[in-house]
Image (cartoon, rainbow, N blue to C red):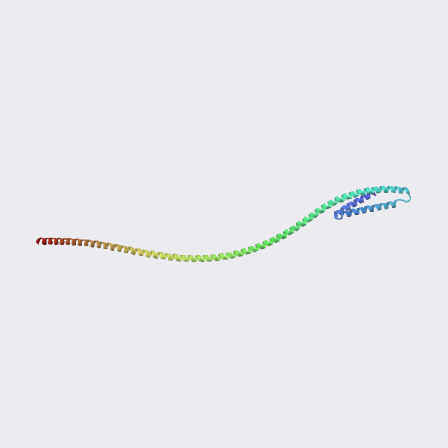
Amino acid sequence: MKNNRLMKNLGKATVAAALLATGVSPVLAATENKTEVKSNKTAAESSSKKTSSPESSKASSSSEASKSSSSAASSSSKKAAKKSAKKSTKKAAKKSAKKSTKKAAKKSAKKSTKKAAKNTKKVAKKTTKKAAKATKKSTKKAAKDTKKAAKTTKKSTKKAAKDTKKAAKTTKKSTKKAAKDTKKAAKTTKKSTKKAAKDTKRAAKTAKKSTKKAAKNTKKAAKTTKKSTKKAAKKASAKSTSASSTSSAK
């Protein structure tokens, strides 16, 4: 009977530990163990009273001694069971708390990771969508600007080509006119030079003729002067002789 009670108490302690592992309060489990021990004790005493024979006083004395011994053993077993239950409960509580903490931490980490991944995915999706929209807008604007620039360049090139053609035409015309003017000027210069040379030759010829004539005239004049001088001298000499003769006659 002692062994049965001890086994029952140990069983209850194990149940308390299991209840604690599943989330039941250890205080409640301990209370249930105490109640069960009391119930077992009462049942044992009642059973002992029923089985004892009222006819034999010797048997009654023996039963009293056995009861006293049983009570002492029960008290010792109760203490041992309580100590064992307390140790098992503490160990189970520690193990359960560790397991629960580990499980809760794992679950919390998993939930946080899942939530963070979901938020990251959402943010990435939103950012990608926003970036794609901005890129599309920029590309569209760039294409529009390129088209506009190409149109402007085409227009400028066309105008530049037209201006170049016009300038080339004007240059050609100017060059042709300049060449014509140069040719005309050269012809005029040649004509003028020829005329000038002819005039110079004529003037030289006239100058030579005039010089020759002037020299001849000068020579003639000198000769005439010489002749006149001679005549005058002769006349003067005759006049002087005549005067002298007249003077001598007087």
Place of residue 6 in the rendered image (x, y in percent of width and height, measured from the top left): 81, 43
Residue 100 screen position, x and y as percent: 72, 47
Q: In the image, residue 163 lies at what x, y percent?
A: 44, 57
Residue lying at the far front in this picture: please name it: 250
Q: Position of residue 25 (x, y in %)?
A: 76, 48
User: Is 197 on the left-hand or right-hand side of 96?
Assistant: left
Residue located farthest toward the left when viewing the structure as drawn = 249
Q: Where 17 sits versus 178, above or below?
A: above
Nearest the eye: 174 or 29: 29
104 or 184, which is in the foreground? Answer: 104
Residue reaching furthest to the right: 55
Comparing 138 with 74, the one in front is: 74
Count of numbered tags: 0
Quadrant where the C terminus is found in the figure:
bottom left
> Where is the N terminus found, in terms of image quarters?
top right
In which quadrant of the rendered view does residue 184 lie? bottom left
